[in-house]
Image (tube, rainbow, N blue to C red):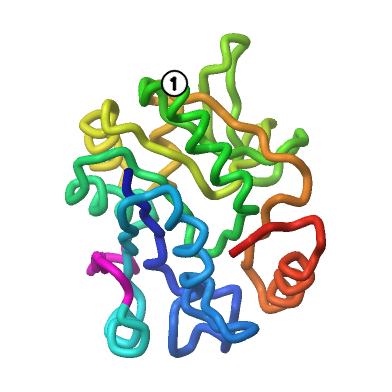
Amino acid sequence: MRGVILAAGRGRRMGRYTDDVPKAFLEFDGRTLYDRQRALLDPHVDGTSVVLGYRHETVLDRFDPEDPIVLETWDRHENAASLLLALRRIDDDVVILNGDVLVDEREVGRLTDQFDALEGRLNLVGCLPGIQNRETAIRWDDSGRVTDYGLIEGNQHAGFGIVSRDHRAAAIRILRERLHDWYPCVYPRTPTRPMLLPDGRHVEINRPADLERARRWLASEQIRCA
């Protein structure tokens, strides 16, 4: 299994914080988001690729990331194009993390354990509990298969999941046709099961205020995060 971190975007809502580096390479408490994400994935993968775009020259020069993949069209396409580029390069099961998400390490382990138990037959997508209709969400049917993704009433996508090698070719075809979409559009179009996360096991950094929220989250005795 390989890890993929999608970090091509700038993160405009972070304002001046991303003038020089993309959001995934912001440093706080002495480490970048990317460094923390790699540490989360390392016990479960044979290596981690990162898809870069905005300021990729700076990232390559300053941080020397493992196995970088550069999306030249980052400013014209959404992150479906980032995952497409990674899947074309990686012929393996792929654990995907958005570049602005941290997840409790127990949930990463649970995701990979569930995937192993399914013997790679299904993709998996992490979802936050609670019904909502304002954020991008995942919905599934009574059999537990994902049926929809978008601005719908459903459980919010948590920014991580697994695409099986068995469904790689189908995912490539779907992403190639949807470069202006978000990559979870793959999940309702390939055999995918949701995995619900407990409350508080996930943090997403979208705005400057989220940096302090992330610090509190990392410092919590209830959280395990490398």
Q: Amino acid at mark 1?
A: Leu
**Residue at point 69%, 31% (across, down):** 153
Rendering coords of residue 100 (x, y %): 54, 64
Q: Residue furthest right?
A: 221
Which quadrant of the figure contains the N terminus?
Answer: top left
**Residue at point 49%, 64% (across, down):** 39
Residue 155 relative to residue 167: left or right: right
Q: Please identify the dominant SS of the magenta region.
A: loop
Q: Secondary structure at mark 1?
A: loop
Find disc 1 in the rendering and name its residue: 118
Rendering coords of residue 121 (x, y %): 36, 20
Asked whether 56 falls inside the magenta stretch, the response is no
Q: Is 55 above or below relative to 9?
A: below
Snapshot quadrant of residue 17: bottom right
**Residue at point 29%, 82% (across, down):** 60
Where does the magenta region start and end?
Answer: 65-76
Rendering coords of residue 42 (x, y %): 43, 57
Q: Nearer the viewer, residue 118 or 192?
A: 118
Asked whether 69 falls inside the magenta stretch, the response is yes
